[in-house]
Image (tube, rainbow, N blue to C red):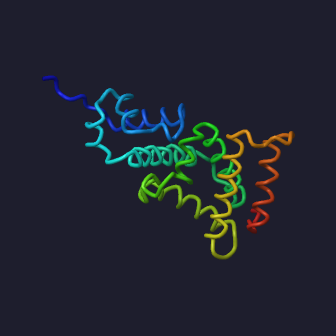
Amino acid sequence: MPAPLRVSQERLVHAIREIAERDGIDAVTMSSVASAVGMRTPSLYKRAAHRHDLLRLAAGDAVRELMTDISELPAHDSAGALTVLARTLRAYAARAPRVSALIFAAPSAQADPTPASAEPLLTALMTAIAAAVPGDPLPAARTFTAWIFGFCTMEQAGAFRLGGDVDEAFEFGLDALLGAIGARRG
């Protein structure tokens, strides 16, 4: 009898992400992922208890990839850091629209990035917000995140149908958001 195929974590995550981006989050199933990596579905259950574990792997990988983008950004004043962070989040959402949605809106808590994998992104966001706004940064961070995620979700869905320049709308919205949350200009 041949030895079971060994699938690296990297290959498994790549397959999950590829299926999600190509066919949608709902297409990430135990059988679709097992097939993509050349293993039998029962063997995959040794690595993940259910599909939400698979989505959690993809979400954690998305955070890691996004943090690589963020860590390569030059230093800015506090409002400038938020501007660059917003633009980086938008660029990432354009590059990986379905998997990036798992970071902010996974289909269940079981599919959310683990607290350990999400922590670097949350720290970067809270640090940038705390440096830019007076008072408790949590409401501002929630508002900032919700606006960016909402904008990106609408943009990826092609929901901006009123004409005009979507890039211009993003910059206008970002300026309005920074003013609304009271971001101090450096």
Residue 25 position within the rendered picture, expressed as x and y whole percent measured from the top left: 51, 41
Residue 133 position within the rendered picture, expressed as x and y whole percent measured from the top left: 69, 69
Q: Picture quarter containing residue 51?
A: top left
> How many numbered dots are placed on residues in this image?
0
Q: From what the image shows, is residue 186 above or below residue 152?
A: below
In the rendered structure, the answer to whether residue 89 lies left or right of residue 164 reads left
**Which image quadrant: the C terminus?**
bottom right
Residue located at (73% from left, 67% from top): 181
Residue extending furthest left? 1
Q: From what the image shows, is residue 4 above or below residue 172?
A: above
Q: From what the image shows, is residue 139 above or below residue 44?
A: below
Residue located at (79% from left, 49% from top): 171
In the rendered structure, the answer to whether residue 58 lies left or right of residue 151 reads left
Residue extending furthest bottom? 135
Residue 8 position within the rendered picture, expressed as x and y whole percent measured from the top left: 31, 35
Q: Picture quarter containing residue 94?
A: top right
Identify which residue, 185 or 116, lies in the foreground: 116
Residue 60 position within the rendered picture, expressed as x and y whole percent measured from the top left: 45, 48
Residue located at (39% from left, 34% from top): 33
Residue located at (65% from left, 70% from top): 139
**Which image quadrant: the N terminus?**
top left
Identify which residue, 77 or 111, lies in the foreground: 111
